[in-house]
Amino acid sequence: MNDESDKQTMADAKSLEQAVEALDPGALAEFRRWFAEFDAAAWDHQLVADATAGKLDALMAEAEDDYRNQPHRPL
């Protein structure tokens, strides 16, 4: 990113902040519901992308190693 795009991003963020602050309680509740769903979907997409790219392989190997080598009881 460059300075101009950083400034535009900050201006966009400030505009969004002001728009959210201006919402009436009902509209704010609807926005919060929508944003929670949007954010969860973005998180899910990133998790799948990271798993597909192998970024979680080391964590999975560590967890499997811990499971094999640590005492545990069946659930």
Image (cartoon, helix red, strand yellow):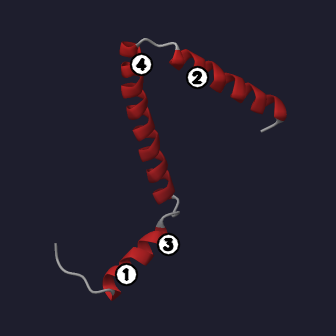
What residue did someone put label 4 on? 28
Label disc, if present, on residue 58 of the rendered structure: 3
Q: Position of residue 24 (x, y in %)?
A: 43, 11
- Hey, which quadrant is residue 28 in on the image? top left
The quadrant in which the N terminus is found is top right
Q: Is residue 61 above or below residue 34?
A: below
Label disc, if present, on residue 17 of the rendered structure: 2
Q: Position of residue 41 (x, y in %)?
A: 41, 39
The answer to whether marks 2 and 4 mark residues whose Cβ atoms lie closer than 8 Å is no
Q: Within 10 Å of the Cα at label 1, are there few (<14), some (14-19), or many (20+) other Cα atoms?
A: few
- Residue at 45% across / 37% down in the picture? 39
Which sits earlier in the primary sequence, circle 3 or circle 1?
A: 3
Q: Within 10 Å of the Cα at label 2, are there few (<14), some (14-19), or many (20+) other Cα atoms?
A: few
In the rendered structure, which amino acid carries the disc numbered 1?
Asp
In the rendered structure, which amino acid carries the disc numbered 4?
Leu
Label disc, if present, on residue 26 of the rendered structure: none
What residue did someone put label 1 on? 66
- Nearest to viewer (mark 1 / mark 4): 4
In the rendered structure, which amino acid carries the disc numbered 2?
Glu
Which sits earlier in the primary sequence, circle 1 or circle 2?
A: 2
Cα gap from disc 3 to disc 1, whole angstroms? 12 Å
Q: Position of residue 35 (x, y in %)?
A: 43, 29
- Residue at 19% across / 80% down in the picture? 73
Cα gap from disc 4 to disc 3, whole angstroms? 41 Å
State the SS at label 1.
helix
Left or right? Give the position of 69 relative to 53.
left
Cα gap from disc 1 to disc 2, whole angstroms? 44 Å
- Residue at 34% across / 88% down in the picture? 69
